Image (cartoon, rainbow, N blue to C red):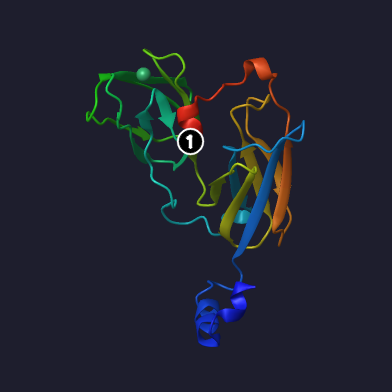
Amino acid sequence: MRLNFLPIAALVVALAFAGPALAADLTVTVKGDDGTPLPDAVVLVHPAGGAGMGGPIHYSWPIVMTQQNISFNPYVLIVPVGSTVAFPNKDKVRHHVYSFSAAKKFELKLYGQQEERTVNFDKAGVVALGCNIHDVMIGYIYVADTPFAAKTNAAGEAVIHGLPGGAGTLTVWHPDMKAKAPIDQSLAAGADTAAVALGLKPVSLRHKKSTASMAM
Ligand SMILES: [Cu+2]
């Protein structure tokens, strides 16, 4: 094991900076009801009583929704409520991005390469994105009202860091799930893992991501 080769002093320093003793990490595994791991699922925790919820929300990833190779990148973006999101166009063609979702109706009329646009998302919820020019372009912005958020990787896993450690509510959403609203389930105090199985739409109704967006 690699760890054996670390000098003791380095280990002591690493432990000293490991963060508040009570904060815990939660690993959430999201699968379809057929057992397939689901990447791009949004996973959120609202601690009971609003513990750890004060102050502005900052995520570790860029709050940017790029148009590139005739697709939205990333396919699913989680942003804090109140965010102003940039929509840079990195294609040579023009795009015309819009949403009809209740959480944010907007339209960015035809704009070309290097013409960046921004939109403010002031209400929590799911915002489905489309492009008037390119029907294949589908993306999602999940506007979240908690600092405890993560998106699942290719293995269907997401890790939420620094939870206060008490009980809470786990919320999961995925573009392919049959239910229209996100799924809530209760989280026991001190839980460090959770598993969620989502009922999925029939394969014919799921969005087939282009090769370009899969590469991200
Ligand atoms: Cu377009």
Q: Residue 168: horizontal and vertical position, in percent?
A: 66, 52
Q: Residue at x 30, y 30 (%)?
A: 90
Where residue 63 sits, quadrant-wise, is top left
Q: Residue at x 43, y 56 (%)?
A: 55
Q: Which element type, helix, strand or loop, lies under badge 1?
A: loop
207 vs 212, left or right, is right
Residue 49 sits above or below residue 106 on the image: below
Residue 103 sits above or below residue 13 on the image: above
Q: Quadrant of ligand 1?
A: top left
Provide the residue designation for mark 1: 215
Q: Residue 74: horizontal and vertical position, in percent?
A: 45, 35
- Disc 1 marks a residue whose amino acid type is Ala
In what quadrant of the picture does the N terminus appear?
A: bottom right
174 vs 108, left or right, is right
| Ligand 1 lies under 8 Å from the Cβ of mark 1 | no
Residue 101 sits above or below residue 59 on the image: above
28 vs 131, left or right, is right
Q: Estimate how packed mark 1 is, as few (under 14), some (14 to 19) or many (20 or more) residues with alpha carbons within 10 Å.
A: few
Where residue 135 sits, quadrant-wise, is top left
Q: Residue furthest right?
A: 34
Q: Residue 17: horizontal and vertical position, in percent?
A: 50, 75
Q: Residue at x 38, y 20 (%)?
A: 98
Q: Residue 173: horizontal and vertical position, in percent?
A: 61, 35
Work out whether residue 31 or residue 216 is closer to the camera in this orientation and state it: 216
Q: Residue at x 65, y 53 (%)?
A: 27
